[in-house]
Amino acid sequence: MTQIRGVQSWCLGVALHLILAAALHQGLATVAPPTAAPHKDPGRPEKGSYVVTRSNGTACLLASMGLQLNVSFNSQNKTVQEVVNLQPNMTKPSGSCDSDRASLLLTTDAEKTNLTFIFTLNATSNKYHLSEVSLSADWPDMKEPLSANNRSLDYLRGTFGFSYMCHEEQTLSVSQDFSINTFQLQVQPFGLTGDQFGAAEECQLDEDDMLIPIIVGAALAGLVLIVLLAYLIGRKRSHAGYQTI
Ligand SMILES: *[C@@H]1O[C@H](CO)[C@@H](O)[C@H](O)[C@H]1NC(C)=O
Ligand SMILES: *[C@@H]1O[C@H](CO)[C@@H](O)[C@H](O)[C@H]1NC(C)=O
Ligand SMILES: *[C@@H]1O[C@H](CO)[C@@H](O)[C@H](O)[C@H]1NC(C)=O
Ligand SMILES: *[C@@H]1O[C@H](CO)[C@@H](O)[C@H](O)[C@H]1NC(C)=O
Ligand SMILES: *[C@@H]1O[C@H](CO)[C@@H](O)[C@H](O)[C@H]1NC(C)=O
Ligand SMILES: *[C@@H]1O[C@H](CO)[C@@H](O)[C@H](O)[C@H]1NC(C)=O
Ligand SMILES: *[C@@H]1O[C@H](CO)[C@@H](O)[C@H](O)[C@H]1NC(C)=O
C-alpha cells in the first residue's frame, strides 16, 4: 500500500508541476515584449480611441487600436525602412459616414502624416470590409513627400451592427512600400447604436490563440484521468493481493 501511495503522490506531483509550468508559461507569454527588430524598434504602439460623428453629433464610426506604420522611402539617395508608432494623443480623427461607405482620417501633429481608412458595406450581404487605405507623409528625413494607396483591399471583414476585433498583432499590407501593424484592434464602421461597440466578431488569429489554453487544459485533464485510473487499478490489484495472502 505504501508503495502505491508513493506512486500516486509522485504522479500527482508531476501533474501539479505540469499545471504550474503551463500557468507560468501563459503568464510569461502575456508579458513578454514583442520580438525586437534589428534597427530602431519603436516598441508596441499605444492604443488610441477614435470616433467619427455625423453632423447631428451621433457617432457613426468607432475605432480603438494601436497603429504602427512600416514605410520604406528614399532618404539621401538611400532607401530606408522606418517603423513608426502613431501617438494617440497627437493624432486627430475625422471622417464621414454614408450608407455604404465610411472613412476614418487620422492626422498627426502638424499634419506630417495623413492616414485614411475607407470601409465599404455590401448592402446585399450586410458585410463590411476595409477596402481602401491611403497614406501621405512628409517626415523630416524624406527626400520628397510620400504617398501610397490601395483601393482594392479586403481586410477587417465584419457584419453590419457588429464590431470587428483582433487583439493579436495583425499586418495589413497596403503597397510594396507600406504596411500597417495593428494591435488590440476593435472597429465598427456601420450599424452603431449609441456610442458603444456592437457585439464583437473576433479574428482568426485570436481564435487560434484561444485554442492553446484549451488544448493544454484538455491534455492536463487527460493526465489527471490517467493518474486516477492508475491509482484505482493499483488499489484493486493490492486488494486482490491481500485476499490471496
Ligand atoms: C442623427 O442622424 C442619423 C442619420 O443622419 C439618424 O439616424 C439619427 O437618428 C440622428 N440622431 C439624432 C439624435 O438626431
Ligand atoms: C517592415 O516591412 C519590412 C518589409 O516588408 C519587413 O521586412 C519588416 O519585418 C517589417 N517590420 C515590422 C516591424 O513589421
Ligand atoms: C544623390 O544622387 C545625385 C545624383 O545621383 C547626386 O548628385 C547627389 O549628390 C546625391 N546626394 C547625396 C546626399 O548623396
Ligand atoms: C503623449 O503621450 C506620451 C506617452 O504617453 C507622453 O510622453 C507625451 O508627453 C504626451 N504628449 C502630449 C502632448 O500629451
Ligand atoms: C455583395 O454580396 C453579394 C452576396 O454575397 C454578392 O453577390 C455581390 O457580388 C456583392 N457585391 C459587391 C459589390 O461586392
Ligand atoms: C494632410 O492633410 C492636410 C489637410 O488636407 C494637408 O494640409 C497636409 O498637407 C497633408 N499632409 C501631407 C503630409 O500630405
Ligand atoms: C493592393 O492590395 C492587393 C491585395 O492585398 C494587392 O494584391 C495589390 O498588389 C495591391 N496594389 C498595389 C498597387 O500595391
Image: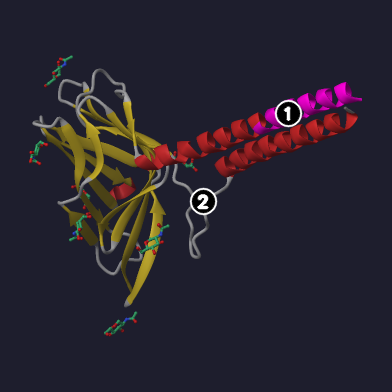
Q: Are marks 1 and 2 in contact (CB under 8 Å)?
A: no
The Cα–Cα distance between marks 1 and 2, rounded to whole angstroms, is 48 Å
Q: Main secondary structure of the magenta part?
A: helix
Q: Position of residue 49 (x, y in %)?
A: 36, 33
Residue 161 visible? The answer is yes
Residue 194 forms part of the magenta stretch: no
Q: Is residue 36 above or below residue 185?
A: below
> Label 1: few (<14), some or many (≥20) within 10 Å?
few
Judging depth in this view, the residue of 190 and 92 nearest the camera is: 190
Secondary structure type for disc 2:
loop
The amino acid pointed to by label 2 is: Pro
Q: Position of residue 131 (x, y in %)?
A: 18, 45
**Mark 1 or mark 2, which is nearer to you?**
1
- Range drawn in magenta: 226-245
Q: Which mark is residue 34?
A: 2
Judging depth in this view, the residue of 4 and 198 nearest the camera is: 4
The amino acid pointed to by label 1 is: Ile
**What residue is drawn where x is 44% and y is 46%?**
45
Q: Position of residue 217 (x, y in %)?
A: 57, 33
Locate the N terminus and report the quarter of the image it occupies.
top right
Q: Is residue 138 above or below residue 24?
A: below
Q: Position of residue 219 (x, y in %)?
A: 58, 37
**What residue is drawn where x is 55% and y is 49%?**
33
**Dot 1 corresponds to which residue?**
233
